[in-house]
Amino acid sequence: MNTKGNYDSPLKATLKGITDLYRKKSNSLDLPKDIDLKAKTVLITGSSAGLGFAAALRIAKAGAKLIMAVRSGIPEKGEEIKKITGNANVSMYPVDLLDFESIKGLVKKLKEDEIVVDILISNAAMVPLKSRKTPQGLEEMFMVNYLAPFYLINQLIEHQIVKQEHSKIVIVSSESHRNPKEFDWENFGRYHDYGIGETVARYGYFKLLLTTFANELSRRLASQKRQIPIRVLCPGPVNSNIAREAPGWMQPLLKGVFSLFFRSPEKASDPILYFVSESDHENTPIDYLFLMQKKPMDDKATDETNGKKLWEFSEKLIQSLDYS
Ligand SMILES: NC(=O)c1ccc[n+]([C@@H]2O[C@H](COP(=O)([O-])OP(=O)(O)OC[C@H]3O[C@@H](n4cnc5c(N)ncnc54)[C@H](OP(=O)(O)O)[C@@H]3O)[C@@H](O)[C@H]2O)c1
């Protein structure tokens, strides 16, 4: 993979995260003192752990009707949030983003339950040790970190589970989306064998796909006169369990560095809370936050030709698997 070299290995990615975090920041945004989400229904994926769980807890504390779309932690993680926040309006929906069948099942269940979501947060992602196949024969990280959000978000809009008006879509990406030098269109969606040496570079590549999708989605919604602001963010380095698959010998080192230098999931969820609580008047079609600073996304991600091509390739791939 042709990259700029900043996120090519776990070590380089960790060092980049630390330098970004401690670089002097200007124009950092503040969160409102009191966040009131009583009128909102918020759905968040990957809220069983890490950043997603921390954000879910804060969102429930702010009074929202919270929907946790998760693969694990049912029911204990939801019960924990109810107990801590006193908000009983927390429900859990199982979904495994590795599997189209499971995503279809989630959409069907939300529809049956007549759920209408005001704020959708696409947060779940993985960093595997090596490539593995999904039930539909795709590569796991490509599916969970890119194609599943593409499919799920589109399905939720199509089935009008995400409201057409006064709703918002928040997508958790990463600064590593800037690392790839180019798109690999020739091998789009093709299963590729890789090991730990390539994992971090591929993670950045799938975040580039995700960020490019976010921009194309925003353009398509605008052309259909649908007002759904798209918000993309990088939380900065988070002391979460994202490196859970790292080899055993690396674990103590990563755990030490993560707990010493990285931000707690609660603090790291500030940009999510910022976008969730942002007033409805802030209706710019798309915005990006790195930590609490607004920043342009990488040019490759905002490029219209790339966005169009990505959308077409993704649709074609999903059609070829009979899941359109
Ligand atoms: N950690 C960082 O330094 C960092 C930096 C920049 C961006 N981010 C982004 O922040 C987001 C949250 O990551 P995190 O650090 O909180 O990692 P984490 O602690 O590993 O949490 C990841 C969440 O995603 C869920 N998930 C993974 N695979 C799934 C699947 N197949 N189906 C359904 N859910 C699945 C996990 O559920 P299970 O517990 O069931 O696996 C978990 O709830 C990700 O988008 C990540 O790319 C993280």
Image: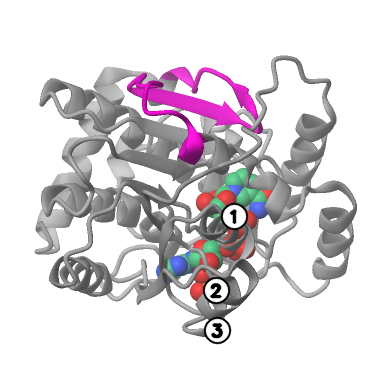
* Magenta extent: 275-299
In primary-sequence order, the first of circles 1 and 2 is 1
Crowd rating for badge 2 (residues with CA inside 10 Å; few <14, some 14–19, many 20+): some
* Residue 258 on image: x %, y %: 81, 55
Figure check: 35 above or below 19:
below
Q: Of the two numbered discs 3 and 1 on the same chain, state the one appearing first in sequence.
A: 1
Identity of the residue drawn at 22% across and 67% down: 110
The residue singled out by tag 1 in the image is 58
Residue at figure coordinates x 81%, y 39% from the top left: 18
Q: Which of marks 3 and 1 is in front?
A: 1
Residue 248, how many percent across, how many down?
A: 78, 75
The answer to whether any part of residue 181 appears in the image is: no
Q: Mark 2 points at which residue?
A: 82
Specify the color scheme: one colour
Q: Badge 3 is on which residue? A: 76
| Residue 116 sits in quarter | bottom left
Select label 2 or label 3 by which is in front: 2
Between the C-alphas of marks 1 and 2, the distance is 11 Å
Label located before the other in sequence (2 or 3): 3
Q: Which residue is drawn at 47% across and 40% down?
A: 276
**Residue type, numbered disc 1:** Arg
> Does residue 229 appear in this view?
yes
